[in-house]
Image (spheres, coloured by chain):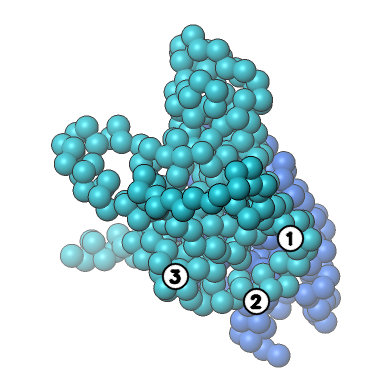
């Protein structure tokens, strides 16, 4: 016993150092994959309040640009309204639509804190569980996909953006519907890459990349970006497809959170897959 | 103003500066300004290494909460605090440090400060980017980020000292 105490006293400094290191690294690794609580993230009330004050000052810097983007989106949507179209046939027909049923609704939100230069970048939004935001909902803006909700508190949520290590959103390259997985290598916030496209397929430069909508997190067809370069990977029969994002994440302000009204049905079905095959189920 | 209140105020000032100003400045190209190591550097000479590490952990966790890094800053600050007495001893004068002085650039001179703070800042940044990126085939990227962030951070820390610190009268 005395030896133990002597040992502890001798290596006291190193033991304190090692335990502090282990605590912080364990928190880091745990929260990276699945956050247990909101208290160590910017979704916690105190942090989000402070960041909201800060954002109240800095949000005006990109205001005119963002207003213009919203206006353009409005025009795009207004063009599709029947009131704005010229009617070719004189008699009007009322159609009771039973083919389409609403699957997705959207919750508008605003980015109050963001980063783009780290290895894993998160955005904090000013909407939370009170507005119906839950973890694993998709987030997009008018120009492109933004990320997936990581953690929520009552009034705020943290979004794991496409600029993180394990984002793995499934996307397709437009004209021929090639499916792949979106990744980010940590270098450039304007470019990502798509994994899992075999190199016997031909891809045209500047073809559009959109979400596949496979697991109900995103609806199909939300833009991601355009193919900028195609590189071969040494020793593997795969292309490394470099995508230029259509959204500039450095000035992102207004976003929408996707709420899938049928997600429970889909998850209940997919929950019946035996667990060893479950690894293949993508986001 | 005694030492304790001075350091408490400094703690708050550094946290606010880092989280609300330097975290939001995103220049790109691997520049990543982290000025909070300067707080650990400026703590008095006679402070024991365990309380140093405790303070470093506390400060790191607060900055982590504000920047969604979950313990990354805490880990690298504790690493720096652990190495602080070792580097200080290596570069210290033979008769030991004068307890009335403070380890800043005015009291200790340019040369001493550049060596000591430079080494500590490199340790801090290298550990930070090693853990953050955690891929050894990207080692040059880690080195590039470390250098690109440590050099501007060092210059800003030199500037900050002239705003935040009064020269001690003992010199």
Q: Residue at x 61, y 71 (%)?
A: A51
Q: Look at the numbered disc 2 and give the secondary structure of its residue.
A: helix
Looking at this view, name the residue that lies furthest to the bottom.
B1
Q: Which residue is mark 3?
A: A131
Q: Look at the numbered disc 3 and give the secondary structure of its residue.
A: helix
Which circle marks residue B169 in the picture? none
Residue A238 located left or right of residue A59: left
Q: Residue at x 49, y 29 (%)?
A: A172
Q: Nearer the viewer, mark 2 or mark 1?
A: 1
Q: Residue at x 63, y 38 (%)?
A: A245
The percent coordinates of residue A98 (x first, y second) are: 35, 48
Q: Earlier in the sequence, mark 2 or mark 1?
A: 2
Q: Looking at the rendering, in which quadrant would you find the N terminus of chain B? A: bottom right
Q: Residue at x 26, y 66 (%)?
A: A5
Q: Chain coloured cyan: which letter?
A: A
The percent coordinates of residue A38 (x first, y second) are: 41, 67
């Amino acid at each position: 016993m005395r030896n133990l105490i002597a040992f502890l006293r001798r290596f006291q400094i190193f033991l304190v150092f090692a335990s502090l290191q282990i605590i912080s690294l364990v928190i880091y690794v745990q929260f990276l994959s699945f956050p247990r609580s909101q208290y160590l993230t910017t979704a916690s009330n105190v942090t989000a309040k402070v960041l909201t004050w800060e954002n109240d000052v800095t949000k005006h810097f990109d205001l005119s640009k963002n207003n213009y983007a919203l206006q353009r989106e409005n025009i795009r949507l207004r063009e599709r309204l029947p009131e704005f179209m010229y009617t070719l046939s004189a008699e009007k027909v009322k159609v009771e639509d039973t083919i389409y049923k609403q699957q997705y609704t959207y919750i508008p939100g605003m980015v109050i804190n963001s980063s783009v230069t780290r290895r894993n970048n998160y955005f904090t939004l000013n909407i939370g569980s009170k507005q119906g935001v839950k973890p694993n909902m998709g987030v997009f803006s008018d120009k492109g996909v933004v990320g997936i909700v990581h953690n929520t508190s009552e009034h705020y949520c943290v979004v794991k953006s496409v600029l993180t290590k394990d984002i793995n959103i499934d996307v397709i390259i437009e004209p021929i519907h090639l499916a792949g997985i979106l990744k980010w290598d940590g270098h450039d916030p304007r470019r990502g890459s798509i994994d899992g496209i075999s190199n016997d397929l031909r891809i045209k430069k500047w073809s559009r990349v959109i979400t596949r909508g496979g697991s109900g997190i995103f609806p199909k067809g939300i833009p991601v970006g355009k193919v900028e370069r195609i590189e071969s990977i040494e020793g593997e029969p795969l292309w490394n497809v470099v995508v230029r994002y259509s959204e500039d994440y450095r000035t992102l302000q207004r976003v929408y959170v996707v709420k899938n009204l049928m997600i429970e049905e889909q998850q209940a079905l997919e929950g019946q897959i035996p667990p060893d095959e479950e690894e293949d189920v993508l986001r | 103003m005694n030492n304790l209140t001075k350091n408490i105020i400094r703690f708050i000032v550094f946290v606010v500066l880092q989280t609300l100003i330097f975290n939001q400045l995103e220049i790109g190209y691997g520049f990543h300004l982290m000025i909070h190591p300067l707080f650990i550097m400026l703590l008095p000479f006679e402070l024991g290494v365990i309380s140093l590490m405790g303070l470093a952990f506390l400060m790191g966790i607060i900055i982590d909460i504000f920047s969604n890094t979950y313990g990354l800053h805490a880990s690298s600050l504790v690493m720096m605090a652990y190495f602080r007495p070792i580097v200080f001893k290596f570069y210290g004068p033979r008769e030991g440090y004068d307890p009335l002085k403070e380890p800043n650039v005015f009291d200790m001179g340019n040369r001493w400060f550049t060596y000591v703070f430079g080494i500590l800042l490199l340790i801090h940044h290298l550990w930070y980017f090693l853990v953050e990126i955690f891929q050894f085939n990207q080692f040059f990227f880690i080195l590039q980020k470390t250098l690109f962030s440590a050099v501007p951070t060092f210059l800003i820390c030199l500037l900050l000292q002239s705003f935040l610190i009064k020269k001690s009268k003992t010199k």
